[in-house]
Image (cartoon, rainbow, N blue to C red):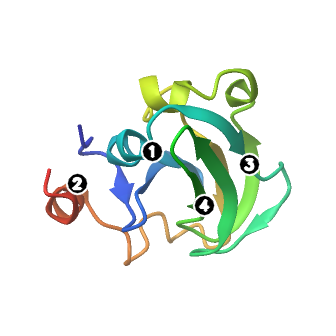
Amino acid sequence: MIPEDLRYTAAHEWVRDLGDGVVRIGITDHAQSQLGDVVFVQLPTVGDSVAAGAAVGEVESTKSVSDLYAPVTGTVVAVNSALEDNPEFINSGPYEAGWMIEVKLADATATAPGDLLDAAGYRELTGG
């Protein structure tokens, strides 16, 4: 499952443009299936600055702990607090209830930075 309206990173994060220079970020269905059952998520807090390519949190599963990388540069404006009590939302709905953070882009014109993949590019990367 690779939604056509999103952009993707090679590290398996997705980016949804919400408009007004804000994007929503999470991990892909491919990533959550590789991780297994997610049991804990550590996310940045609202107001934190994030830089594209930098680790901004962790996703812990029954198999491993993986870093969450920021696909864009900006300021965190929302965090999915439902994940504190329900980290399994990442498994059951990685593109819906399992979203992680929303970021106000440092450069509002960069809603689709050049290093992000479209759905076809991500499908090719994952063999999906």
Residue drawn at point x = 66 percent, y = 68 percent: 55
Mark 3 belongs to which amino acid? Leu
Disc number at residue 107?
Answer: none
From the viewer's perspective, tell me whether residue 29 is left or right of residue 108.
left
Disc number at residue 119?
Answer: 2
From the viewer's perspective, tell me whether residue 126 is left or right of residue 99.
left
Which percent across, then down, holds residue 30? 32, 46
Q: Nearer the viewer, mark 4 or mark 1?
A: 1
Mark 2 belongs to which amino acid? Ala
Q: Secondary structure at mark 2?
A: helix
Residue that numbered label 1 is attached to: 35
Residue drawn at point x = 48 percent, y = 63 percent: 111
Q: Is residue 67 above or below residue 83?
A: below
Mark 1 belongs to which amino acid? Leu
Residue that numbered label 3 is attached to: 43
Residue that numbered label 4 is attached to: 67
Query: Could you give the CA–CA distance between mark 3 and mark 1, rounded to whole angstroms?
Result: 17 Å
Q: Is residue 60 above or below residue 90?
A: below
Q: Is residue 63 above or below residue 47?
A: above
Mark 4 belongs to which amino acid? Asp
Which mark is first along the chain, 3 or 4?
Answer: 3
Q: Nearer the viewer, residue 28 or 108?
A: 28
Q: Secondary structure at mark 1?
A: helix
Answer whether labels 2 and 3 touch (C-beta < 8 Å): no
Query: Could you give the CA–CA distance between mark 2 and mark 3, rounded to whole angstroms?
Result: 25 Å
Q: Secondary structure at mark 4?
A: strand
